[in-house]
Image: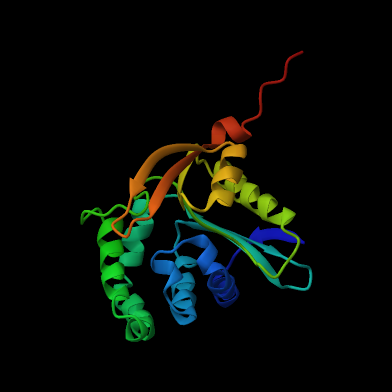
Amino acid sequence: MRIRLAKPSDSSAIAELHYLSRDKLSKGFFSKVSKFFLVQYYKILLDDPNSVVVCAEEFDGVIYGFASGTLDAEKQFSNMGKHKMRFFLALLPSILMNPKILLDAISRYLSTHGKGSEKYVSVSGARTEFWVWDPRNNKSIWAGVLNNSHLHLLFILGVKGVHFEVDENNQAVVKFSELNGASMVDRIVLSDGRVRLIMHYDLVKKFARKPNRY
């Protein structure tokens, strides 16, 4: 297995992994949307100049995991906002199945643009978004390698610290992140009752080499 940068041509495979794992990631907006929406989302995301996405791929070309993030959340959300009509059209099948999802989409859009009363994610600075491993693949040790490879790449690209969000009830990710060096910086109660933790990695502390001593 190898870790490599994800490309726009990987959008369908990445969307498939996200769709298969959506219930484990969160109970929010992205757990309710269709696979069609996710494909469109990742096509746009992977074409964004601020996005940094890596994937774990077997040598036969099958992708089993990915980790996504951005160098600048504010710029990324601004750029993705330019595609709001495309997102709306992609969301239509999901809206027909669950009309309330439109309200979730509007609330999330306002939040990512610094408007509205709800806070879902960090909207400035470097941010990691999703870290997904195929539940059908038992090489889960590579999930940790994938996560750290993504963080290390961000550090190489000049990021000193990065925020990410995780629902408090996702204790497997919370505990892994804490053991991996992350710290909690905020705790938010969302309108649907979910408790979301804002966590942070100090990448300088995690990856910077100590000077040699002679």
For this rendering, which residue is in front, 178 or 153? 178
Q: Residue 24 location in percent, x, y? A: 54, 63
Q: Image check: 143 left or right of 105?
A: right
Q: Residue at x 38, y 58 (%)?
A: 76
Q: Residue at x 46, y 38 (%)?
A: 184
In the figure, 144 relative to 96: above or below?
A: above
In the figure, 120 relative to 177: above or below?
A: below
Q: Quadrant of the N terminus?
A: bottom right
Q: Residue 139 location in percent, x, y? A: 76, 60
For this rendering, which residue is in front, 73 or 32? 32
Q: Quadrant of residue 50?
A: bottom left
Q: Quadrant of residue 78?
A: bottom left
Q: Image check: 20 left or right of 113?
A: right
Q: Look at the image and name its color scheme.
A: rainbow
How many marks the image carries: the answer is 0
Q: Quadrant of the C terminus?
A: top right
For this rendering, which residue is in front, 191 or 54? 191
Q: Residue at x 71, y 58 (%)?
A: 140
Q: Residue 66 location in percent, x, y? A: 60, 62
Q: Residue at x 60, y 34 (%)?
A: 206
